[in-house]
Image (tube, rainbow, N blue to C red):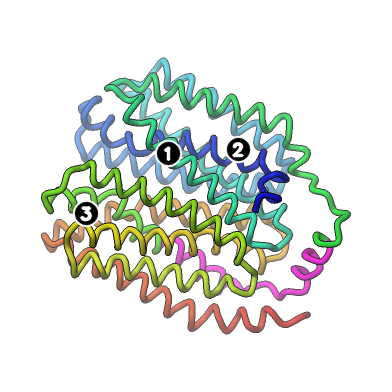
Amino acid sequence: MWKLVRSLWPLLVLGLLVNTAYSVMWPLTTIYLHNNLKLSLVVSGLILAIYSGFNVLGGYLGGVLTDRFRAKRVGLCLLGGLVVDAVAGFFWNGRLAYPVVLIVFGLLTGGMLTLITAMAAQLSQGSGRVFNVLYIFINLGLVVGTASIGVLFQHSLQPIFFLLIVCYVLATGLWVKYADRLIRPARKTTANSTATQGRAKRRPLGVLQIGLVLMSLTLMWLTYAQWMSNVSVYIQNQGFSIRLYSHLWVYNGILLIVVQSLMTKVSRIKTLPAQIILGLGAIGCSFLLLSSTTGVLALFLAMTLLTLGEAIYVPGVPALINAYTIGNEGKYQGLVNAFSSLGKAVGPVMGGLIIGTSQDFSVLFLVCALVNGVVVVALMASVLPALRKADEPL
């Protein structure tokens, strides 16, 4: 792991900086639109829907642009746009300006996160370990970003946008200095040559199998998003404070880093299908536990299952798609980010509709468990047989 960190640290720090900025913005959006700008929940929801749509679009376009143009130029354009957007948000964040700033932020962030993942795919030479290490740094950004909110946000977004400006300026400097090194990895080592040859001998997955793997991302994040939205209401309905909810996410961040550090030692191409299925199963079991048990211990046990599933499954999907597709890393990693963003966007809305209809959180949790279970069965029935054939040399 430490060898990977030393060789790829500019890309890893870039992921940390971009995700810190992303993680400090999205939790505040609904609060700021509704409480500070006094917009109705309907209007706020519409703005969030447009933002999410542009985030999905940015994820896909970022991948396509990375394949068609020089990655260094694409990165500079995206980071430059993010700096300008953050500066604009620092000075103008009223009813008209903030939604525009937010939508541009969603578009450019989606593109930048895809670029980072696509660069990881190109540098991985078919190995899944790079994605595990990158995911550790992305989650460090999540912890730093969410932890900064309580300190920086005091009914004004200027400190938040100042942090964004700092992150993007540092990221731009890092990209200018090290982009060429990341785009042109050394090709002289035997290990790289062997990995490249091994990847070339793998059969590419079919469109149906790739589509199912990508759809599993959307459905998983659709259920996972309940923890980021509706579970907070569930915890308060159980008589617990919002501080407990905060402690659960701190626990999530620490456990993710520990598990991902271990995954870098055991992750192999052949184990990726098992990773994905086990991860989805653990996430489904976390919702099954929530539907049947209450109390602080149950919440922490459910969060443990959720975190283990996330740590195993999430980096496994881009690694699997990268290993069993030939070329166009940007396009495929763009699809990974786009399908993930779609699930995160639709999830809270779906959860709210189910709760509003049933008036029972247990129904929502059972639906989430069922969704993950159905995805596991679909992957085992369709993708696993195709992977067995894909492992056969051409």
Residue 254 or residue 167, whichever sits in front: 254
Q: Which mark is residue 352?
A: 3
Image quadrant in which the C terminus is located? bottom right
Secondary element at tag 2: helix
383 w.r.t. 294: above or below: below
Q: Amino acid at mark 1?
A: Ser
**Alpha carbon of mark 1 to alpha carbon of mark 3: how far?**
22 Å
> Where is residue 31 drawn, in percent x and y?
26, 33
Q: Residue furthest right?
A: 188
Query: Pointer 1: what residue?
Result: 23
> Where is residue 204 drawn, in percent x and y?
68, 72
> Where is residue 189 drawn, in percent x and y?
86, 56
Specify which label sits upstream in the sequence, 2 or 3: 2
Specify few, some or many for label 1: CA neighbours under 10 Å numbering under 14, 14-19, or 20 or more: many
Residue 309 as seen in the image, left or right of residue 130: left
Look at discs 2 and 3 and give the one toward the viewer: 2
Quadrant in which residue 147 is drawn:
top left
Residue 297 as seen in the image, left or right of residue 59: left
Magenta range is 193-218
Q: Is residue 371 magenta?
A: no
Image quadrant in which the N terminus is located? bottom right
- The residue at the point 14 percent across, 61 percent down is 357
> Where is residue 123 drawn, in percent x and y?
72, 52
| Magenta segment, prevailing SS (helix, strand or loop) | helix
Look at discs 1 and 3 and give the one toward the viewer: 1
Specify which label sits upstream in the sequence, 1 or 2: 2
